[in-house]
Amino acid sequence: MAAEPPMSELNQQAPGYYRMMLGKLRITAVSDGTVTVPLDKLLTHISPQELQRRMAAEAMTSQAETSINAFVIDNGQQRILVDAGAGDLFGHKGGHLLDNLAAAGYPANTIDAVLLTHIHADHSGGVSRAGKLAFPNAMVYVDKRDADFWLNPNNANKVEASQRHTFAESAQTIGPVAAANRLKTFTAPATLLNSIHAMAGAGHTPGSVIYRVESEGQTLMLWGDIIHAKAVQLPDPQVAIHFDVNQQQAIDTRKRVLAKAAGQGAWVAAAHIAFPGLGHVMRDGQGYRWVAANYTTQLAP
């Protein structure tokens, strides 16, 4: 009889990556891990009863296990990573991005650029690990409004007390990138790397952006924190979260982005919808619903 693998292996998922083709672009979703988010304490503009009902409709509770997804855009000449996971900041719950990138065939030293949707622990925390650059050959891009806000501790009194840890975390993780002259800022709307469009999406943070890529008539929108709770915020985009620096602006941005995604029939790569976070947004009554990508192994003709 073959020896049983150790229990530690039996408790692990397969390496967290999934690929799809967008025209001639290879898009790879890569998992940084999952973290439990107490939606009952964080969501606003929704009653406890309605929150429970919405979550139960998807066989979930308000203590929702939430994916942390990043994405690689590979055009054959450049490997561009969108968001960098939590790095060292979430303990074992995050920080799996580098291992999963390597398993997907993208070792960290082969990444040419990192595009941040915004500065928050689970999106920007992985740009450095223990003070060293996680992607030594990559430039890290972020909207100037986020860099100016989160890298200046004098702004701490402009956010809720529960958000102030982001200033120290930003200094810890983005500081080494800036010190190495690897941080490049832009102001959305902007076109980056000749083909990726950054669209302004302020509200969740001052410099949140949505990236858009196109190939062969297909469009992909890559967003960070437009959605935290799919079961709740898609049918009711008015629901906000305490992580938002400006909740009303975040609501307005969510409505605009969801309408655009649904109206254009675009693919969406979402940071916090269950891995791999690839799918479409469809109109559903007064709100929207998520249609996950149909699983495929057909990546080449």
Image: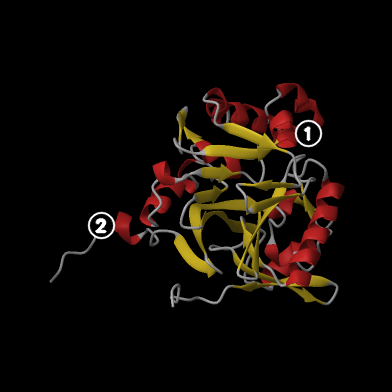
Question: x%, y% of residue 254?
Answer: 79, 57
Q: Residue at x 25, y 57 (%)?
A: 6
| Type of the residue with mark 1 | Val
**Dot in front, 1 or 2:** 1
Crowding near the residue tagged with mark 1, few <14, some 14–19, many ≥20 C-alpha atoms within 10 Å: some
Q: CA distance from mark 1 to mark 2?
A: 46 Å
Count of numbered badges drawn on the protein: 2
Which residue lies most toward the left here? 1
Q: Which residue is mark 1?
A: 159
Mark 1 secondary-structure assignment = loop
- Could you tell which of marks 1 and 2 lies nearer the N-terminus? 2
Tell me the quadrant of the picture where the C terminus can be found. Answer: bottom left
Q: Residue at x 80, y 45 (%)?
A: 203
Q: Residue at x 77, y 59 (%)?
A: 257
Above or below, comparing residue 129 to residue 114 in the picture:
above
Q: Which residue is mark 2?
A: 6
